[in-house]
Image (spheres, grey):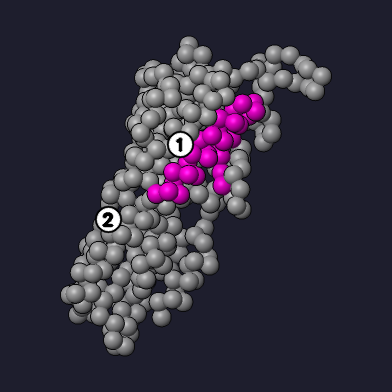
Amino acid sequence: MNQKAGDTIRREDRIGYGIGGIMAKKIKKVAVLTSGGDAPGMNAAIRAVVRAALSSGLEVDGIRRGYMGLIEEDIIEMNAMSVTDIVQRGGTILYTSRCPEIKEKKGLKRAVSVCKQHNIDGLITIGGDGTFRGAQDLSELGLNTIGIPGTIDLDIACTEYTIGFDTACNTAMEATDKVRDTSASHERCSIIEVMGRTAGHIALWCGISNGSEYVMVPERPEANDEKKIIEKILSKRRVGKKHHIILKTEGMGDSYKMAKRIEEATGIETRATIIGHIQRGGNPTCKDRVYASAMGARAVDLLLEGKTNRVVAYRHGKYTDYDIGEALAMTKDVDPILYSLTKRLSR
Ligand code: ADP
C-alpha cells in the first residue's frame, strides 16, 4: 500500500477528471501536531502552518500532545490569534508526547477515524524520524500527511536543516564558553557532554565553534580512543596550553568516569559538564525562526498541491520535499570536511 514518490492522490480522493487530468479533492481543513522531542522553533513552524493555511482559505485545528492527543481527541480550533506572540518562544504550545499506541493498528485506525470526525483532510506532523514513521502509517490508511523535520539533533538524513539545531548549538556553545573561562582560570581539562542521541552534529559544531581539542562523535567510534586523547592533552600541555576542552556526544560512555580516568592518567584536574536539557529550551535563533516558518508554509502548500506522505527538507540551498519512505531509508554522516577541520585546527 506504500505510495511511491509523486503518486500523491488516492483514488477515493479523486472527485472528477478535468481537461488537464485528475483533480485532487479540495482540502478544506488541516491539522498540526508536534511529536517526540521538543525543539526551539517548533512554535514558529506551528504559527506558519496556521497563518499560511488561513491565508489560503483553510481551517486549521491544533492537536495537543502529538499522536496521543489525536487518539484521545485533544483537538483545538486554531485562528490567527491562537499563534500570536509565539514565534520567539521555545518549546511547543501544542505540547508533545511519545505515543506507543500509534505504532499499533488499533491506534492508527482510531487516529484516522478522529480525523474523519473532525473533517481533517491533511495532517502536518512536526518531529523526527519516529514521528515520520507514524505519518507514513497514517498516510497508508488514507490520511494525507506531511512531516516537518523538528529535532535539535539534525539527525534526519534527507535535510541539511532541522528545526532547533541552530538554537541548541548556540546554547551549547555559550555554555561551553562559560565552562572554558573557569577551566582556563584553574588550568583544567573539561569534558563537555552535549546532546545528539546517536548523531554527533551538535558536538561537531560546538567543537569547532569552541576551539576544542577533541570531538567525540558516534559516527567516528575511533575518536573514543582515550589513549589518543590523553596523549594529545599531554602534548598540548608540554607546548604551554593551560586548559583543554573535549566535546563529547551523549551516549558515548560515562563522562564523569572518563574525567576521573583522564585526571589519573595526566595529573591534570579534569571535570565533566553535562549540558543537558537547557539545549532544548530558550528562544529560537533567527535562523530557526525563519527556516521553521518557511517549512511550515511549505507543508501547507504541499497539502494544497494534493501531496501526501512527504517530508519537507532543505537541501543544496533549496526547500524541497521527499517521500517519507525514501527519506527514512537515507543515511547521514557527520560532515567529513568539518570533522577533519576539528583535527586540523586543534594541532
Ligand atoms: P522523534 O519523532 O523525535 O524521532 P520518537 O522516536 O520518540 O521521536 O517518535 C515520536 C513518536 O512517533 C512516538 O512516540 C510514536 O508515537 C511515533 N513513532 C515512533 N516510531 C514509530 C514507528 N516505528 N511507527 C509508527 N509511529 C512511530
Residue 199 falls left or right of residue 306: left
Query: How dense is the environment of label 1, judged by Cα within 10 Å: few (below 14), some, or many (20 and up)?
Result: many
* Amino acid type, mark 2: Ile
Residue 266 falls left or right of residue 7: left
* Amino acid type, mark 1: Ala
Q: Which residues are magenta?
A: 285-314
- Give the mark toward the camera: 1 or 2: 1
Instruction: Using the image as rendered, state which of residue 237 and residue 256 is in the foreground.
Output: 237
The spot of residue 244 in percent (x, y) is 29, 74
Q: Quadrant of residue 78?
A: top left
The residue located at (61%, 37%) in the rendering is: 323
Residue with the most extreme bottom position: 239
Residue 207 falls left or right of residue 275: right
Residue with the most extreme right position: 19
Q: Is residue 305 magenta?
A: yes
Query: How dense is the environment of label 2, judged by Cα within 10 Å: few (below 14), some, or many (20 and up)?
Result: some
SS category of the residue bearing label 1: helix
Task: Name the residue carrying label 2.
Answer: 275
Q: Is residue 189 magenta?
A: no
The spot of residue 141 in percent (x, y) is 56, 22
User: Main SS type for the magenta part?
Assistant: helix
Position of residue 244 relative to residue 136, above or below, is below
The quarter of the picture where the N terminus appears is top right
The spot of residue 346 in percent (x, y) is 40, 77
The residue located at (32%, 50%) in the rendering is: 279
The residue located at (39%, 49%) in the rendering is: 285
SS category of the residue bearing label 2: loop
Position of residue 171 relative to residue 284, above or below, is below
Task: Name the residue carrying label 1.
Answer: 45
Instruction: Using the image as rendered, state which of residue 89 and residue 320 is in the foreground.
Output: 89
